Image: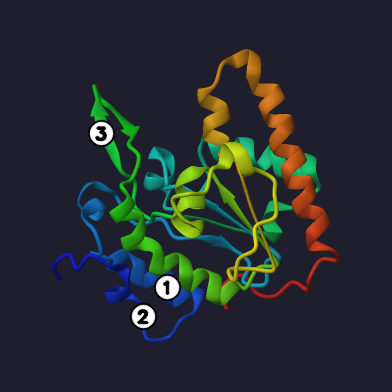
Amino acid sequence: MEETGSAADFLPPRTTLPALREAVQGCRGCQLYKNASQAVFGEGTRSAAVMLVGEQPGDQEDHAGRPFVGPAGKLLDRALEEAGIDRRATYVTNAVKHFKWEARGKRRIHAKPSWSEVAACRPWLEAELAVVKPTVLVLLGAVAAQGLLGKQFRVTKQRGELVTSPLAPYVTATIHPSAILRGEPADRERELARLVDDLRKVAAWCGPKRGSRSADR
């Protein structure tokens, strides 16, 4: 099937996480599938109180087929642990499901997805939100935040704040872990501490943990 400009044309008739995860591999909503190894769908429990949304899979995620398994994912794991949030009880995903990259020698370097690519992929994210129904939605970085909250949103000015939105009872945005890794080494511990502070608010908004259910029903 040719590109259609929207992932909506590739959503399965039955909206479950397993059905969505299978269908996303056939998505031709934009051109990014052409250079990616595979689509990388979200991962976690359907009953997650916290849903974290990043920008797009990176090189390691593209090969593994799982979100947040590279250096940024490891930093996110550390921040979640320090904030008292068990990643295994969360749902993690990305605004864009295919890795967009450009070659630099033998390396594949992350390239920022365009606004149209984020918009084309949004139906997958909306479907994940409809299934998981998180108590707290955490948007990591500008691409995820602006993709769901509008181009006017500024993570630098509004990070850690509650945003009124129909997407979830609590919606907030903070820095993406990859931005910490790209920063000066001397600044990383300070920026990590700020991320942990933002995530501690998330832990407080969750309240008592919801009952655990099968991860992918």
User: Is residue 88 toward the left or the right of residue 131 in the image?
Assistant: right
Which is nearer the eye, 195 or 38?
195
The residue singled out by tag 2 in the image is 12
> x, y percentage for residue 201?
78, 49
On the picture, is 204 further left or further right than 213?
Answer: right
Above or below, 14 against 169 in this view is below
**Callout 2–callout 1 Cβ contact below 8 Å:** yes
Residue 87: % across, % down: 68, 52
Residue 20: which numbered mark, if any? 1
Relative vertical location of residue 151 with respect to residue 123 in this rendering, above or below: above
Q: Amino acid at mark 3?
A: Glu
Indicate the quadrant where residue 113 lies: top left
The residue closer to the viewer here, 130 or 146, is 146
- Discs 3, 2 touching: Cβ within 8 Å: no
- Mark 3 surroundings within 10 Å by alpha-carbon count, few (fewer than 14), some (14 through 19), many (20 or more): few
Q: Residue furthest right?
A: 208
Q: Which mark is residue 173?
A: none
| Residue plotted at (47% across, 51% down) | 146
The three-letter amino acid code for the residue at tag 1 is Leu
| Label 2 vs 1, first from the N-terminus | 2
Identity of the residue furthest to the bottom in this view = 13
Q: Earlier in the sequence, mark 1 or mark 3?
A: 1
